Image (cartoon, rainbow, N blue to C red):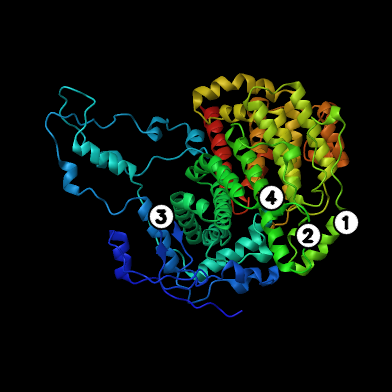
Amino acid sequence: MSAPTILTPDSGIDSSRRLSGIPPEPQPSIASSAVNSETPILTQTGTVELAHCMPFPTNDVAASDTRTVSEFGTWFLEEDFDVGALDFSLTSTISEWAQIPNVFPTNELAVREQGIYTPLQSSAPDVDSAIPNDETVRRKWFTRMSPPREHHSSRDFPASGPTLTSHTNTNESYRAGLSQKLRPRIQDEALPTSEQLNLFAKLYFHRFHPLLPVIHTPSFRPTAENALLFLSICSIGSLFVGSSRALAQGARIFERLNKAILASWESFISRSHPDAFSMVQAAILGQTYAILAGEPKYLVLADVLHGTVVAWAREANRLGDLRHCTGDFLDENDMDSSWHRWIECEQRAQVQVALHIHDAELATLLHHQPIRNHRFRQFPQLASDALFSAPTASEWATLYRQSLQSQPSDPVYPRSQRSLDSFPITGRHSRFTAYGLLESINARLVDAKQSDEFDHLVCQEISDLLIKWWKTYYTETQDLFCLPVLWHSIFISLYADLDLLEQSIGRDGHHPAFEASTPVREWASSLNASRCLIHASLITHYLERMSISSEPAIHVPRALFSAALTYLCVANHAPKHIICAQAFASPEIELLGENASQAHCFPEYTHTSEGSIIADFDHLYRLIDLLQRGGRWGISRAFAGVISAALEEKGRTSLG
């Protein structure tokens, strides 16, 4: 396949015409296959129209290309690729969405109409200034957003005005200020060079893709339809470069891409289902970046937009022709087309599992109810890992025939058991299925706690599900998803009220922390606290054995934070806590055998006839160290900062 011709975007004159609202010169019609036209197009609906400025192959070309995963570097951007064309398309879309240029002249803001009230600027204090200086935990909390550096309200609105007959009337100056408030403030910067984008993409596929396989790597090629997905890939890949400059570039890509998707999602949804699904994949990777980056505003944004992305995925599936996702895919006369039809359906199923994971992680981290349906009987049925990663159509066909021969038939339940929500019988050879199911158990627990339905029966049900999951899906081989860590962290959530523990270390300030101290003190001396410390210790041992070249899964920072939080609260409220022997008799601990014995969990502590005495903060510092070394994720370092701040605040209190 010959390299595509690299062309430049339109001239500065045409760009000025488009941005200023002047109609461009008439252009001849262009065939859909001509992806290398000279003019990047901004549609009337504000869609990012990249097909005419990106040197990417069409889907038809990509469909006939069956190179292996190891060769994916050959399709990357050429050295003379004009990033400015892509840059222009993103900027144009965001600019149209933001209604640039400004339609209100500067001098109009100074107009004052006599007899009309101009509202006064608010005198409410900043949120940041309202936090006392000694509440360091509250200031450093991973969801606390700092106020903007400049206060736009003073720029958009007059500071004072005459107050005559009515305090509800407005003048033209205030109307102009309202318009300014509704207009997004754009900080637009150029995209990185093609060489840097290539580096980011390579690092994504080598380091991150195995942790969230929502893209079929062997068949993926940058096309006009998935250009936004390619940029989303690059934003995550920037986390693995190891330089502050690359991190800043990735953040700027994420912010611009997020605005571009929000500006034109309705056009993607309405055009074609491949475009819509590619946008959903881009949004999911963007959500993942927002969760892991460690920026409070990104994390809050991910939570706010999670329901929107779920709705986009639902709409994309509704518009897509999913009838071919049932039955036998294999057509011996057209094996390549069969493979690509199967890929589309399988990617949609993988995306649904990724949404389950995001739903559970956000609900657990931010203490609210999940929004997804986590019924096991409706869980997506994924193919085996080997089948999904088959590099060519012929290898896929061989594995697909084998899967049809070994596929179990759907179980037939007696009428009395049809209401049971059991694990799916398929998916035993898909680790991503095991990951999604474990997160669904996690989501069920969070939902029960947030809806005040958590009781002894629910506790027993969740415990039984976790034990059943372990017996069904646990493997001693290397686990890229670090699923034992997630399994132990769910037990910590089962035995502790993490929301209350967070409150007790100062998340919401000193007064709520004081109110939480009594119930937390009772918990810290309980059997459940002993169980939490055992699971926290097992998380520590698992992660300390990981290879330094391994990347931690998405949930690992949160699991470490939960483990550190339990140790911190026990050390604060019951510093001489003794691990109760009954805790080692818990069903899930007995299930692990010698790997969860007292000698294995706490070899460094003094043993007594009653159990193992927990030394004050020794183990806690090991957890903080693991958080600080937690791979590329900024959220891990943010968690470490919170725990360290809590220790410092505790030290100042003790000295005082």
Secondary structure found at label 3: loop
Toward the left, the furthest residue is 114
**Which disc is residue 422 wearing?**
none
Give amino acid for label 4.
Ala
Viewer-side label of 1, 2: 1
For mark 1, what is the residue?
Answer: 405
**Residue at image location 32% in from the left, 51% down from the top:** 99
Depth check, mark 4 against mark 2: the one in front is: 4
Quickly name the residue at label 2. Answer: 386
- Between discs 4 and 1, the one toward the N terminus: 4
Q: Are marks 3 and 2 in contact (CB under 8 Å)?
A: no
User: Label 4, on which residue?
Assistant: 349
Give the residue drawn at x 78%, y 28%.
461
The numbered mark at residue 46 is 3
397 or 292: nearer the viewer: 397
Up-down relation of residue 242 to residue 649 (above or below): below
For the residues marked 3 and 2, what is the alpha-carbon distance in whole angstroms?
41 Å
- Residue at horizontal 75 percent and vertical 37 percent from the top: 535
**Whole-number angstrom distance, CA of label 4 to CA of label 2:** 16 Å
